[in-house]
Image (spheres, rainbow, N blue to C red):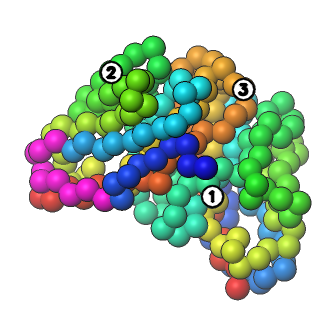
Amino acid sequence: EPEVTQTPSHQVTQMGQEVILRCVPISNHLYFYWYRQILGQKVEFLVSFYNNEISEKSEIFDDQFSVERPDGSNFTLKIRSTKLEDSAMYFCASRWGAGLSGANVLTFGAGSRLTVL
Amino acid sequence: DQQVKQNSPSLSVQEGRISILNCDYTNSMFDYFLWYKKYPAEGPTFLISISSIKDKNEDGRFTVFLNKSAKHLSLHIVPSQPGDSAVYFCAANTLWNTGNQFYFGTGTSLTVIP
């Protein structure tokens, strides 16, 4: 079964450092998302991406965050200068389409755990 | 603004009995609802969904019920099995709004006791 793959599975970084989290969405999917979950808390939306541009972003997704789809297969989340409160599990997700209920299911990756020290 | 709410953070059920997980939403524009299951240190996995044109959708042991007038949905698992022990999230979005986010509830941790 097709899956969303994320790397690294765990990254430890110092506060203020840049981090890039990588995702390979399912190949025929058109919509891409980043969510995160701080330990024990809810799953929070960060950003959605379609047709090579951001469709929607949350208040969390400030100037320190950026996304890119550099080569048609990878989808990356960059945090320019990490803060302690960025420590969380980051989930990439993708879906095939919209408007038809069968296409409107988000498939998630296993997550990248980011620890900021 | 929490548009999707799961008011029960945890639920314990005996094996073989029915598990009922509840979810409420506030945005009447939502027309598609999903349930996800999540194990620790894994990503959420899709379980079952329902569009607003239906009031029930069934898939094996899992049934989702939608009450649009009450803005309420529920997930029934019967019979419950120990392997069902996980955190369950409900989610909602609007089918025709391309690229929009899925709104997630805070999750209900289900424990099925053997």
Q: Residue at x 28, y 33 (%)?
A: B62
Q: Which residue is mark 3?
A: B98
> Quick check: A41 above or below A14?
above
Q: Amino acid at mark 2?
A: Lys
Q: Is residue B17 magenta?
A: yes
Q: To which chain does the residue with label 2 belong?
A: B
Q: Which residues are magenta?
A: B10-18
Q: Residue at x 59, y 26 (%)?
A: B29
Residue B20 falls in image quadrant: top left
Counting every numbered tag in the picture gives 3
Q: Nearer the viewer, residue B5 or A52?
A: B5
Left or right relative to B38: residue A87: right
SS of the residue under disc 2? strand
Question: Could you say which disc has been placed on residue B56 in the image?
Answer: 2
Q: Residue at x 77, y 40 (%)?
A: A56
Q: Position of residue B38 (x, y in %)?
A: 43, 53
